Image: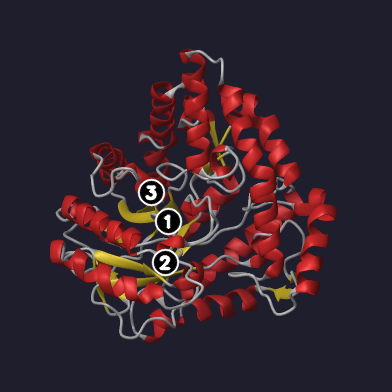
Amino acid sequence: MESRGSGFLRTSGTQIIDGLGKPIRLRGVNLGGILNMEHFVTGFAGTETMMRREVARALGEERAREFFDRQINAMFGDDDAALLEGLGVNCVRIGFNYRHFEDDQAPFELKTAGLAALDRVVELCARRRIYSILDLHALPGGQNAGWHADNPTHLPLFWQHRHFQDRAVWLWEKLASHYRSNRWVAGYNLLNEPADPTGQAVAAFYRRVIPAIRAVDPDHILFIDGNRYATEFDIFDEPAENAVYTCHDYAIASLRAQGAYPGVTAGEHWDAAALEAKFLERSQFARSTGTPVYVGEFGPIYTGRPDRDAELYQILDDQLEIYRRHSAGWCTWMYKDLGRQGLVGVRADTPYRRLYDPFVAKKQRLATDAWGTDYSAVAHLIDPIVDLVRREFPAYDGYPWGTEYWVHTLVPHIVFAEPMVADYAAIMAGLDDRQLAELADSFQFANCDTRQGLADRLRADLAAA
């Protein structure tokens, strides 16, 4: 039986152990969308910063701040933590945006409100004997090109500017100082899904930030993502002490609306053997260095179609079985959203869904969300651009996942999504304070449904030895 809560967790060879030396396999969920909002999670278009700016214009700075503070609190409360405890979860990964702790116009000045917001979630989980991994999910300048890094430029400028890196090191020093005595913090995930096209800057940054944290906090585990969205680890030499090299293990077959499982998706055949081969490839560095294997993110994007979702659940079952056999810890992506992927989803009869479902449907039709989008409605517009780029630039292979993904992401995410940002905010304009409170409270656990098929599978796996 796994022991919890006795001293700091630490690594010991291929295992994570507690303060009594007993092994613990960390398994849980990502709490995305709370302190780092994403378009598919809460329904806006574009990036979080763009959305917040437009909502502030529509409501005024103070009312907008009150709305978002209330929404953040609604996104995770004690009822949510109780559900996770009931499933047997022993770990959550809490993604957060640097903007909660520092302002671009006032760098190196700590916002204590950010610490209070993060403390609240950590404490709610600790009361339920659930560890927290603190995940810096969005860094100054963007550590990758994605919306989930709150990156409006779609260029990973974090790697090109020493100033941005200085601020990230400073922030981790502040966070490490604040949490160094907290035994319910499992450790620090230094940056989510780095993507440096040169392959040269990521390891250099780790060599800098790790000793800076260790000078402040020598005890907590460091969770270290590989380059190219936590899939490539050839940038590392010897592993750091008390560190876990975390891979992300999304299966293409679980992210595309088209295809079959087992079967061919995006030109690749996917079955349980293919899933295991990809997992072994992504976890090779951890296994070869005798360090713990941990999957920081994985999980299907559900469709609401019973036949297709049955295939997606089979992918999930196969991945969980693979992780059991290889003693890998994991955090599934993700806990709560509007129904696309979360363990729980906001109900359709809530004020938020009633008001924003038409907007979300338009986003789906225009393929503005880069995560879980069906491009069929705009394929006649985008596919010719893909063909044009391939014809005119045959040697080009858009980083990180090829030309087709590059075009399919950038065109709708800029040309279609950015004009929709103001439309999202305009829907709120004219609402009174009571109505805004009802929108925010739609995200409370009482107003959500649990994805039972997912919950049942997680509970079964978490009950297994």
* First in residue order: circle 2 vs circle 3: 3
- Residue 344 in picture, x, y percent from top left: 53, 41
- Marking on residue 96: 3
* First in residue order: circle 2 vs circle 1: 1
385 sits left or right of 25 in the view: right
- For the C terminus, the image quarter is bottom left
Query: Which one is closest to the eye, mark 2 or mark 3?
Result: 2
315 sits left or right of 83 in the view: right
Report how far apart the C-alphas of labels 2 and 3 lie in the structure: 22 Å
* First in residue order: circle 1 vs circle 3: 3
Alpha-carbon neighbours of circle 3 within 10 Å: few (<14), some, or many (≥20)?
many
Residue type beneath disc 2: Gln
Residue type beneath disc 3: Phe
- Pick the front one: 269 or 354: 354
Task: For the residues labelled 2 and 1, say whether their Cβ atoms are less than 8 Å apart.
Answer: yes
Examine the rendering and report whether any part of residue 336 can be seen.
yes
Q: Quadrant of residue 273?
A: bottom right
Q: SS at mark 1?
A: loop
Which residue sits at x=46%, y=64%?
A: 193
Report how far apart the C-alphas of labels 2 and 1 lie in the structure: 9 Å
Report how far apart the C-alphas of labels 1 and 3 lie in the structure: 15 Å
Residue receiving disc 2: 160
249 sits left or right of 356 in the view: left
Q: SS at mark 3?
A: strand
- Residue 271 in picture, x, y percent from top left: 68, 73
